[in-house]
Amino acid sequence: MAATRVELREATRERVLAAADRLFRERGFEAATIRDIADASGMSVGSVMAVGDKNALLVRIFDGLIEAGHERTTPDSGDDASCAQSMVNLVRPFVSLFASRQDLSRVYASIQVLGKEPSPLFSRLAVLLVDDISAAISRHGCTSPRAVAPIAQAIYFAYIGTLFSWSARPTIDENELADSLHATFAAICTCKEQPR
């Protein structure tokens, strides 16, 4: 059976993104060119540009990784997990992503902050993550139902601010970042935290 236009377009998109991801990691964002991506993917420059410019390609790559990370989130690490630790468990896949791809994380964060290439996933994921945070707070039972939504919002914005500010550091230690987030989340949560 012959592939449909949609299937061909998706196959092209996947080849371009895979080539861009590999080149961005190997050479760095600035050094990899659209021509390099075209050559590596076996596509024309026009086909690559139909998928997006370099900013759009990086955003699409990170969106895919972030979405996969969201699928791996685990709100609780056991019955004795503190509310703050439950929040750290929720965001740990994203912390791992930013720590493992530090240079690209910086570029991604700058693209998002400057609004150069809006990410629909980033906006949609914000809603999903706030919902996950709200559910974890509710399960923990340490906060009045009326306070859950504003605390979840505060935790989300503290998380994004911390993640983006840490992306500006020369190096990101995943465990230090997780500890920093834990301290921040514990300060926001109204429940009594157990010492770590």
Image: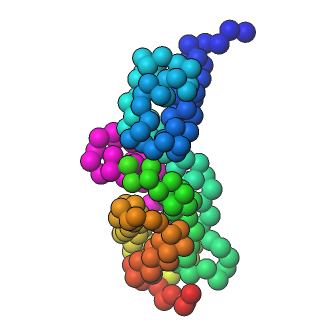
Q: Which image quarter is the C terminus in? A: bottom right
- Nearer to us in this view, 77 or 58: 58
Task: In the displayed orientation, state which residue is furthest to the top.
Answer: 2
Q: Residue at x 40, y 61 (%)?
A: 167
Task: In the displayed orientation, state which residue is furthest to the right.
Answer: 1
How many discs mark residues in the rendered view? 0
Vertically, is 30 above or below 44? below
Q: Residue at x 56, y 13 (%)?
A: 5
- Nearer to us in this view, 138 or 38: 38
Task: In the displayed orientation, state which residue is furthest to the left.
Answer: 114
Left or right of 84: which side holds 112? left
Question: Residue 114, image x and y in percent?
Answer: 26, 48
Vertically, is 42 above or below 57? above
Q: Which image quarter is the N terminus in? A: top right
Q: Which residues are magenta?
A: 108-135
Q: Answer with the quarter of the image where residue 49 lies.
A: top left
Residue 133: say if magenta: yes
Residue 128: say if magenta: yes
Q: Answer with the quarter of the image where residue 34 lies.
A: top left
Residue 51 appears anywhere in the view? no
- Nearer to us in this view, 125 or 151: 125
Left or right of 21: which side holds 109? left
Question: Residue 159, image x and y in percent?
Answer: 41, 66
Residue 3 appears anywhere in the view? yes
- Main SS category, magenta section: helix
Left or right of 71: which side holds 121? left
Q: Answer with the quarter of the image where residue 171 lies.
A: bottom left
Question: Residue 134, image x and y in percent?
Answer: 48, 66
Say how the picture is coloured: rainbow
Q: Residue at x 50, y 82 (%)?
A: 142
Question: Residue 52, image x and y in percent?
Answer: 40, 28
